[in-house]
Image (cartoon, grey):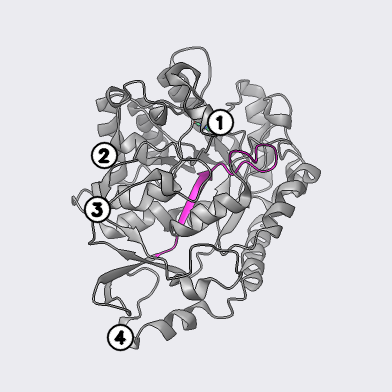
Amino acid sequence: MQFFVSLRRKTYMMTDRFNIKNPESVLRSQLSASEFHTVSDIKKADFPQGNQPFFLFPALADLHVHFREPGFEYKETIESGAKAAYSAGYGLVCTMPNLNPAPDCLDNLKIQLDAIQRCKTAVSILPFGCITKNRQGREPADYESMLPYVAGFSDDGNGVEDDDVMEECMHRIASLGGLIVTHCEKGSGDDRERESAEVERNIRLARKTGCRLHLCHISTKESIEFIRRGKADGICVSCETAPHYLLFTKDDVKGQPNMKMNPPLGTADDRCALVEALKDGTIDVIATDHAPHSHEEKSNGWENSLNGVVGLESAFPVVYTHFVKTGIISFNRFTDLMSRNAYKILHIEQPPYYIRVDLSTPYIINSSKFLSKGHSCPFDGMLVQGKVFLNENDNDNDNENKYETYGY
Ligand code: DOR
């Protein structure tokens, strides 16, 4: 219980820090009363400075980003990641713990928390603490001390191989009411077998321990089947996929480093299963797995380039264009996937912040213009609709009071 209370308090503290006394009144002052809608509505309204139509959406939330501070600031800092997130319409992002030092105890976590505190951004940045010490899969991390400051616990790119260690970790996290967030790669088979083996094992242990389980970037048909069954059995399991798994297959890779990520792109059957799961609610959220690397690290040919692509600044238009505009999912489901469900999974109240989006003007994604330090993006060059609107002079977010001009 303490867990939820602390997180809530933290959310409110963040609201205070941004000096948003009454966000709804800020919004109301920008729109006439008849144009004001509740957070669950998405309605067409007139753009105040012209005739272009825009839509209001709840600010987006991403359960899976890599801001590389501390340890790998040349790839991304909290500040550059926050700028990218902010410009892309995100109000909340959760950062993965593959950092140096890894946040496996409060002392290490504090280095990251201090960097977040120093970053004057309108985006709420909530870190994940580690599941095991130094993400090595051997001993549980120090959950108690980190609990009030984290979104949950994850070892990110490392699956916890040992069943007994995982069971103990889940048992301890469950006793604190916490959330475990797992990358799925267990055993020695190929990538798809490793993913579904860990999905199956983790769901089994969630049933046994009662731990709330969230599964990262699901990419295969088999994993989806295990999750669908787990949910039908009443187990507290949620999952995410990322836009690239919904749009591309391994046939699209063609040796391009901007198609190289972990888990890798799957088959056409996998992609169809993911789209079905997007529609029927088996997939709870779309996360970006925003994983920036330097230009050198992503331009060494297929074999030598690192896994990971950036996704924050393309997520809204890509998902909107391919899944909402085409009628595959509704606006309502879109906001569940891109915003609301993340808050539900974290047990955080969703603040009533909005973004404005121009849904009608087509444009081409140009990753060289991204505010992230990472520019390797599989959607570069794609024709899309759904530009998140920023006001004039609003290209940086170093002002604590930016919600007013951002259009929330
Ligand atoms: O492709 C990936 N890159 N997948 C991950 O899960 C980790 C990430 C990274 O940290 O670069």
The furthest residue to the top: 188
Q: Which amino acid, mark 3?
A: Val
User: What residue does disc 4 label?
Assistant: 34
Q: Which amino acid, mark 4?
A: Ser
SS class, disc 1: helix
Task: Determine contact: label 1, label 2, CB under 8 Å.
Answer: no
Which span is picked out in magenta? 58-75
Q: Distance between the residues labelled 1 and 2?
A: 26 Å
Disc 4 residue crowd, few under 14, some 14–19, many 20+, Cα 10 Å: few
Q: Where is residue 94 in the image (x, y as percent from the top left)?
A: 56, 49
Disc 3 residue crowd, few under 14, some 14–19, many 20+, Cα 10 Å: some
- Please tell me whether residue 333 belongs to the stretch shown in magenta: no
Q: Where is residue 125 in the image (x, y as percent from the top left)?
A: 60, 55
Q: Which of 336/397 is in front?
A: 397
The numbered dot on residue 205 is 1
Q: Position of residue 320 (x, y in %)?
A: 29, 52
Tell us which disc is closer to us: 2 or 4: 4
Q: Position of residue 283 (x, y in %)?
A: 37, 43
Q: Is residue 376 left or right of residue 76?
A: left
Disc nearer the start of the sequence (1/4): 4
